[in-house]
C-alpha cells in the first residue's frame, strides 16, 4: 500500500498586504517531492486597485541551494503569469497549480497593483509517496 506524506508550507503568509507599487515574493524548496500543488489567493479591498495586481509562478532548475527571491532572470523563469483579480472592489481570485516529480524550487511573485493595497497569500502542499 502506498503512503502519502504531505508537507504544507506558507509561501506567502495569509493576509499579506502587497501595497500599491510594491512586490511580494515567497519561495519553497520542492526537491524530493513526488507531486504538489500551489494555491494562490488575491483579494482586492473595499476600493479596488487602479491597476490590478498580478501573481506569477516562477521556477528554478538548480539542484543546489535555493536562489534568493527575485524577478525572472538568471535563476528564476516564469512558468505561469496573468493570475489577477482585476480592479473591482472586493474581488477575489484563487488559482491552483499542480506539479509532478522533478520539481526543484518554486517562487510566487505578486506585483503591479497601483492605487490600493491587494491582499495576497500562497500555500504549497508537497507530497512524497512511499
Image: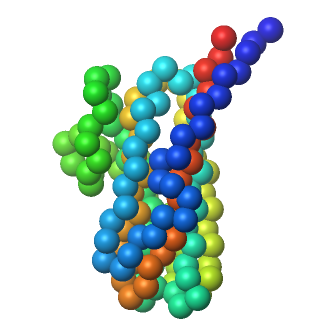
Residue found at x 62% / y 79%: 91
Q: Position of residue 48 (x, y in %)?
A: 52, 87
Residue found at x 31% / y 71%: 22
Q: Quadrant of the C terminus?
A: top right
Would residue 9 be found to the left or right of residue 61 on screen?
A: right
**Residue 66, placed above or below residue 96:** above
Residue found at x 47% / y 54%: 12
Residue 44 lies in what quarter of the image? bottom right
Residue found at x 70% / y 21%: 4
Q: Quadrant of the N terminus?
A: top right
Name the residue furthest right. 1
**Residue 24 visible in the snapshot:** yes
Give the color scheme: rainbow, by chain, secondary structure or one colour: rainbow
**Residue 88, placed above or below residue 108:** below
**Residue 3, placed above or below residue 9:** above
**Residue 40, placed above or below residue 130:** below
Q: How many marks?
A: 0
Asked whether 98 or 7 is in front, the reply is 7
Residue 2 lies in what quarter of the image? top right
**Residue 88 visible in the snapshot:** no
Q: Position of residue 34 (x, y in %)?
A: 57, 22
Residue 24 lies in what quarter of the image? bottom left
Q: Position of residue 117 (x, y in %)?
A: 44, 79
Would residue 41 be found to the left or right of residue 60 on screen?
A: right
Q: Position of residue 104 (x, y in %)?
A: 40, 29
Asked whether 37 or 69 is in front, the reply is 69
Amino acid at each position: 500500500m502506498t503512503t502519502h506524506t504531505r508537507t504544507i508550507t506558507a509561501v506567502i503568509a495569509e493576509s499579506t498586504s502587497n501595497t500599491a507599487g510594491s512586490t511580494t515574493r515567497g519561495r519553497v524548496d520542492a526537491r524530493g517531492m513526488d507531486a504538489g500543488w500551489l494555491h494562490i489567493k488575491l483579494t482586492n479591498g473595499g476600493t479596488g486597485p487602479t491597476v490590478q495586481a498580478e501573481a506569477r509562478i516562477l521556477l528554478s532548475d538548480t539542484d543546489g541551494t535555493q536562489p534568493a527571491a527575485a524577478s525572472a532572470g538568471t535563476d528564476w523563469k516564469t512558468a505561469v503569469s496573468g493570475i489577477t483579480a482585476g480592479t473591482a472592489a472586493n474581488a477575489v481570485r484563487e488559482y491552483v497549480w499542480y506539479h509532478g516529480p522533478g520539481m526543484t524550487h518554486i517562487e510566487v511573485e505578486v506585483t503591479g497593483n497601483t492605487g490600493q493595497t491587494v491582499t495576497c497569500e500562497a500555500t504549497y502542499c508537497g507530497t512524497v509517496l512511499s
